Amino acid sequence: MSEEIEWWEYDDAAEMADAVAGDVQFIIESAIDARGAAVIALPGGKTPVPIYEKLTQAKLDWKRVTIVPTDERVVPLGDALSNVTMIGKAFIPKGARVVPIVPQATKDYKAAGKSADALMQDLHWPLDLCLLGVGGDGHTASIFFGADYDEALNGPKERRALGVMPDPLPPEAPVARVTLSRQGIVTARALMIAVTGDAKRKVIETAIKQGAGSNYPIGRVLADAELPVDIHWAP
Ligand SMILES: O=C(O)[C@H](O)[C@@H](O)[C@H](O)[C@H](O)COP(=O)(O)O
């Protein structure tokens, strides 16, 4: 378990967006200063949309920034459910490189996962940042209960991404996924969570209390994190 999990509370989602965008900007700038480039993973879903709006206003050398989604739904590019499409709409116009991780031609989610993993191996690791969202059921990235849960948590250390079939399928996006593995997530140089609402807060607090045996995916991920983790929360 990370020695330090720090909660940052805001009055509303807009204030949280300002703060998180500021932190992400700082992380990107530091990586560019140190190495000439930054590689970050960003979540899909609805919560980060205002954060991305703020972040696109940051003066950054965007050409040096590579963005991968923390997870993707196995759908065609351009689909309303596609995380990379949402992220790309925000950051491609800035000049960032936004990497689709699900191949267009496949419906086979395990093959999509293997291809995503191969693609991840070509990036600079560890990630400079992994920003996570959390679902009301405690999933994070697309680490869900189901047949692939153990592989997502405990697969070979070098496996950074894999295909996942959630069981049950989440109603907001009832499709197979490709996700960063727990190992891919916890090795990031900076790990941050951004969530809103009391229900998710309760889930995360419970997950942290449960520790390594947590029955929530987010608890299992946090239990394995070694660096400090910032949890940003707004009502
Ligand atoms: O593809 C996804 O589903 C996301 O990356 C996922 O992990 C998301 O962060 C949570 O489901 C929260 O989503 P909301 O912000 O929409 O509640």
Image (cartoon, grey):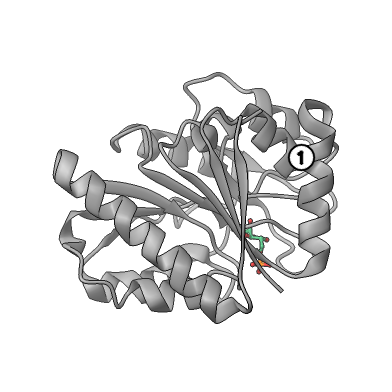
Quadrant where the N terminus sits is top right
| Picture coordinates of residue 197, whole percent (x, y) | 75, 70
Q: Closest to the observer: 205 or 110?
A: 205
Q: Residues within 10 Å of mark 1 (few under 14, many from 20)?
A: many
Q: Nearer the viewer, residue 70 or 173?
A: 70
Q: Position of residue 60 (x, y in %)?
A: 20, 65
At which x and y percent is residue 176? 67, 52
Q: Is residue 101 above or below residue 94?
A: above
On the question of residue 41 being in view, the answer is yes
Query: Is residue 130 positioned above or below 84 on the image?
Result: above
Q: Describe the element under mark 1 as helix, strand or loop.
A: helix
Task: Indicate the quadrant where residue 225 lies.
Answer: top right
* 52 displayed left or right of 113: left
Whether residue 137 is visible to the viewer of this picture, yes or no, is: no
What residue do we see at 16% from left, 39% from top?
A: 35
Report the residue marked by disc 1.
208
Please state the horizontal and vertical placement of residue 211, each as a whole percent of the image.
78, 31
